[in-house]
Structures are given as C-alpha cells and as structure tokens.
Image (cartoon, grey):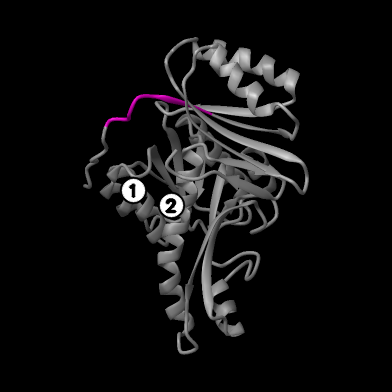
C-alpha cells in the first residue's frame, strides 16, 4: 500500500472568482469591499475580454476571521446583487473531494492518485468508480474503496443513478473522468455542470470521438496532443481547460502515438484538476478563463 506523505495545509485563504460586464470602478469597488472589512488581499488577477465586454477576477484573501464565513458571503452577496456580479468562493482549508471514474487504462488515475499522496494535488480522493474491475488492484494499492458498476446500453440509467448515490454519500465536489471510456448522459452532465472534468486523448477540436491517435496517424500529423475539458452533453465539445502537444515523426506507428500520448494525457489532466481545485477557472460560454498558478 502506498502511504501518504501529505504536508499539513498552510494557513487558510479565501478565494473569490468574479465575473460581470466590464464597467468603470469595478476594481476599486471590489477591493474597497474587502478593505472596509479589514481583509488583507494576498493576490489579485483580472482579465477583460474586449470582444464581449466581460470582466473576470480572481482575488485571494488572508482568512483572518474578521467575519463569520456565512456573514462574509451574505454581505458579499448583497454587494454583488447591487453591482451585477456573478461569483463563487472557496476556502483553502476545505480541500476538494474528488471522485475518479475509470475503465481499464491506469496511467491517468494512477498519476492523480500519486500526486494526491505526494501532496501535489491539495485534494481528497475518497473513492474510485469503474465500469470494469481491472483497476481494483490499483485502488487497493492506494487504500481507496473501489466500486465496480458494470454498464450496458440497457442498464445505463441505473448505473448512473448508482454513481450519483455514491457521489452524494461521499460528498463529492468534482468528478474526474480519468480515461473513463463511457459517455455520460445529458441529464448527468447538466446536473453536475462545471464539476465533471474529462481527458480526451486528442488535440481538440480535431480528432474527436474514438481512436483519435489512429485518426491522427491517418492524417499524417506532425504533432499529437491531449485535451482536458469540462464534460457537456455534446461529446468532446465542453469548455477546454488545458492542452499540450508532442512532436511525432512519419515513422511513428499508431501504437507509438498511443504510448507518446499517455505522457501528455497524464500531464494535461493533472494540470486541469489542479487548476479546478485551486479555484482558478471561470467558465464563460464555450471558453474558460484559467488564472495563473502559484497565487
């Protein structure tokens, strides 16, 4: 069994994500709200999309307990209503609880589990759900409960109902499709909108669907890639969070591309999950705003 080497979480911080139509005085208004309540701003990032006039901000505060958290949220909600803000907040002393959906491929889920153990991902992964039982041994290695929920066309609604029950039981914040080779129903992804991350083994929007590396080989591409995105009702069409590529040669076989791609998939999925659990992503239509790491 692989034991955890996690370090204790540092002092808690408060992270707000904010979006609204761009307007004069936004930064002053938001920062003054926190200054008036004696919160220390540790970091602030902002972006204005001049194409559609939308403004986005990520602001990180020192959690000095100046106000009860519920009181802070109520006061900010009142302020946001007056100002026209859409917002969310997370507290860094409350790590995300992440469920992994898996099938047979181990490279992505194993990498996430190892990063959790090493403390690179500040989250808790309390369970693994598989439609095959091939990775039950991996779950045992990391001392994680493994739930084998087989699926057929005729049992899909019942299987997804079982998944939902487990997500509720384990109080899950984020679902990661770690090479889960099933298409979630429209009802499922709408219910968990913005809370399901998928890894696609291709550089979207090219090579959607099955066997993207074989599609890439047939087209004679000179780079291959992987894409992590939020799952939506449209296959491989969700807002993109992270991508990366690797150069390949004409002599590489489809099997070579699969092996090369595995490393890209691991890295891309880990980056996407890390950005989400650090509350660095705002979804804006079909796009995402991903604020920089380390703040």
Q: Residue at x 64, y 59 (%)?
A: 236
Do labels 2 and 1 touch, CB within 8 Å? yes
Q: Which mark is residue 115?
A: 1
x and y, in percent, of residue 287 in the image: 67, 50
Asked if the magenta segment contains residue 113, the reply would be: no
What main secondary structure does the magenta stretch of the protein show? loop
Left or right of 201 on screen, residue 112: left
Q: Is residue 161 above or below residue 134?
A: above
Q: Is 112 on the left or on the right of 197, as rendered?
A: left
The numbered disc on residue 292 is none
Foreground of the two, 206 or 18: 18
Can residue 9 be seen from the camera position used here?
Answer: yes
Q: Residue at x 63, y 23 (%)?
A: 30
In this view, 191 is above or below 94: below
Which residues, given as a range, are shown in magenta? 8-15
> In this picture, is 59 found above or below 200?
above
Image quarter in which the C terminus is found: top left
Q: Is residue 195 above or below residue 43?
A: below
Q: Is residue 37 left or right of residue 157?
A: left
Instruction: Report the residue marked by disc 2.
Output: 270
| Residue 14 sits inside the magenta stretch | yes
Percent of width and height locating residue 40: 46, 20
Q: CA distance from mark 2 to mark 1?
A: 8 Å
Residue 134, image x and y in percent? 38, 58
């Amino acid at each position: 069994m692989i034991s955890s080497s996690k370090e204790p979480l540092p002092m808690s911080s408060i992270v707000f994500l904010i979006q609204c139509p761009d307007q004069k005085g936004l930064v002053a208004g938001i920062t003054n709200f926190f200054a008036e309540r004696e919160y220390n701003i540790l970091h602030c990032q902002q972006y204005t999309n001049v194409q559609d006039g939308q403004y986005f901000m990520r602001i990180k505060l020192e959690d000095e307990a100046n106000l009860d958290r519920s009181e802070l949220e109520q006061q900010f909600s009142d302020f946001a209503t007056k100002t026209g803000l859409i917002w969310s907040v997370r507290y860094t002393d409350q790590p995300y609880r992440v469920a992994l959906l898996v099938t047979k491929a181990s490279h992505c889920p194993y990498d996430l589990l190892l990063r959790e153990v090493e403390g690179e991902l500040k989250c808790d992964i309390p369970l693994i759900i598989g439609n095959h039982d091939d990775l039950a041994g991996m779950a045992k290695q990391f001392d994680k409960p493994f739930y084998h929920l087989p699926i057929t066309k005729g049992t899909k609604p019942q299987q997804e109902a079982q998944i939902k029950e487990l997500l509720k039981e384990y109080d899950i914040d984020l679902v990661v499709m770690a090479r889960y080779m099933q298409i979630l129903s429209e009802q499922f992804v709408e219910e968990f909108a913005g809370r399901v991350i998928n890894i696609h083994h291709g550089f979207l929007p090219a090579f959607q669907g099955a066997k993207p590396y074989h599609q890439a080989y047939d087209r004679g591409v000179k780079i291959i890639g992987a894409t992590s995105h939020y799952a939506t009702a449209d296959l491989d069409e969700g807002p993109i969070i992270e991508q990366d590529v690797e150069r390949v040669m004409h002599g590489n076989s489809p099997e070579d591309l699969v092996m090369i791609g595995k490393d890209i998939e691991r890295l891309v999925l880990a980056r996407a999950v890390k950005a989400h659990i650090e509350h660095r992503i705002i979804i804006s239509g079909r796009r995402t705003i991903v604020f920089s790491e380390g703040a």
